[in-house]
Image: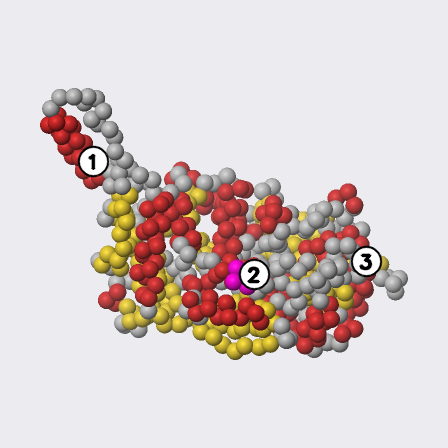
Amino acid sequence: MQENYIRNFCIIAHIDHGKSTLADRLLEYTNTIEQKDMKDQVLDDMDLERERGITIKAHAIQMKYNHKDGKQYSLNLIDTPGHVDFSYEVSRSLAACEGALLVVDASQGVEAQTISNMYQALDHKLAIIPIINKIDLPNAQIDDTKTQIVDLLNVYEDEILLASAKYGNGIEPILNAIVERIPPPKSETEKPARALIFDSLFDSYRGAVAYIRMFDGELKEGGQILFCSSGKQFEAEEIGILHLKRQRTGKLSAGEVGYIISGAKNVKDTKVGDTIILAAYPDTKPLPGYREAKPMVFAGLYPATTENFENLRESLNKLQLNDAALHFEPETSKALGFGFRCGFLGLLHMEIIQERLEREYNLDLVTTIPSVQYRIVLKDNSEVYIDNPLNLPDPSQIARIEEPSISAQIITPNEYVGNIIKLALERRAVMGKTEYIDAKRSILHYYFPLAEIVFDFYDKLKSVSRGYASFDYDFYQFTESKLIKLDVLINGTPVDALSIIIHRDKAHEWGRKMTAKLRELIPRQLFEVVIQAAIGSKIIARETVRPLRKHVTAKCYGGDITRKRKLLEKQREGKKRMKQIGKVEIPQDAFLAILKID
């Protein structure tokens, strides 16, 4: 198809502002999907996405639209996630587009990620079409939302489109605006082929499937292709476009979006952000990639039974192809055996990965306490990065410990500002500037230690603001802090999987709460279980799980008291020996107890 009749665009918005519903209506209006196949969140094909009502993976689909000028246009939609943990998916989608639909909820107005995604789109020099969605709601504040968008984007009011994706209102003007306002792709058909991989997935029958946006030239089936990052060469076995399912066309030209199956079986061959070129032109310059996804939260994943270690490795390898942000490497724990240290974008991302491993690969997993990556500056001025408390160097060798901090923005109605300031102070935040969107809402800028927000900050924020505050963040820098390692000992033996790095001022309180929580969770044994929290060799908190007692004197219905005493003494000696060799089973709940301490 000629480039003038192609439009590549994505939909960006804050979570739950109606991206997936708007995508449904666009597909319905252009007859891309037959009515019998239509369902809510049609592009969200993962069970988890449908259950939680969120988009986790970016999706792509092609629509044909007959414009009022009498010509047919090919519209390539790339749906994007809205949750802050999955913002790396947004950056990948933007790299493959020329325009973006910026969707804002009429009842909520501009929120934190609306602003964040808008700046990303402007950085990619995309044409932005602002849309106010959910105008059918009784509490819709259309005029206020228009004013916010005008101030934010510096556009005229008549450029803002109104829609109700739920009821299909305003869909035709949106399609016309896509054709009229988003420029066609600027590609060179005559140049050697260059294609950007913006997503990839693992097909158990075909191997790695790469979703690509063609920037220059043409790719045909049977041709020899080269992946720039690895330098590996493959044959293009199948090429096509993306409807609800893959549709084979045999070739892709400059400006088009589609897929390529190359016979690559290794999950690392189709690296997202990589450039595909023709093997005949190996000197072709690669395309600039996208913002690399950096893990923010780290946790250990261990199989409940050691026989499943290889299954877990294989499953993580397959998941990594579908999820470029997942990082993992093998690690060993005295308490849990062999497993993997995994890097995630946030707690929701960690939860999703764990649930997918358990559902899709039938694995029973134990997850350790999440932590962040610290920078340790040693006395010889060398630097070490650690994401596991067990790797903390000897304290006598450490000059200082630095923790990652983030630059955050919180948008909230003015009546909740006091609650949010109090929450931020509890989490060791440093306040930046405060801005006012309008008379009712403010933007609070803060610098938080990342470790303080990865556990339950988002839930607490929603709680203190009754659900009205929205939150977005980006990595800022490493900041020096008074951090120490807190160990948990069970019957005098350190449990490595329960160790954490924590701020010195919070250590005593944390130790007391942690031991109290473990006392509730560890089942009673036939011997006494002592739970202690320690900083180095200093014990700062202790709890005891009382032993179960067998009624050994039940048969003594009479006779001398010394007979009973002998039996009780014998029992006491037996328990002492049992304690020396006794092993305490720690349930999975204990490893997640830290998340629920408050």
| Bounds of the magenta segment | 463-467
Image side of residue 339 versus residue 95, left or right: left
For the residue carrying disc 2, how many other residues have a C-alpha within 10 Å: few (<14), some (14-19), or many (20+)?
Answer: few
The residue that label 2 is drawn on is 466
Whether residue 149 is situated above or below residue 35 in the rendered picture: below
Is residue 161 something one can see in this rendering? yes
Image side of residue 34 versus residue 277, left or right: right
Numbered-mark total: 3
N-terminal label among 3 and 2 = 3
**Residue at image location 65% in from the left, 54% down from the top:** 59
Which circle, 3 or 2, is nearer the viewer?
2
The residue that label 1 is drawn on is 575
Quadrant where the C terminus is found in the figure: bottom left
251 or 438: nearer the viewer = 438
Q: Secondary structure at mark 2?
A: loop
Q: Residue furthest front?
A: 558
Residue 65, which numbered label? 3
Q: Residue 212, located in which quarter of the rendered image?
A: bottom right
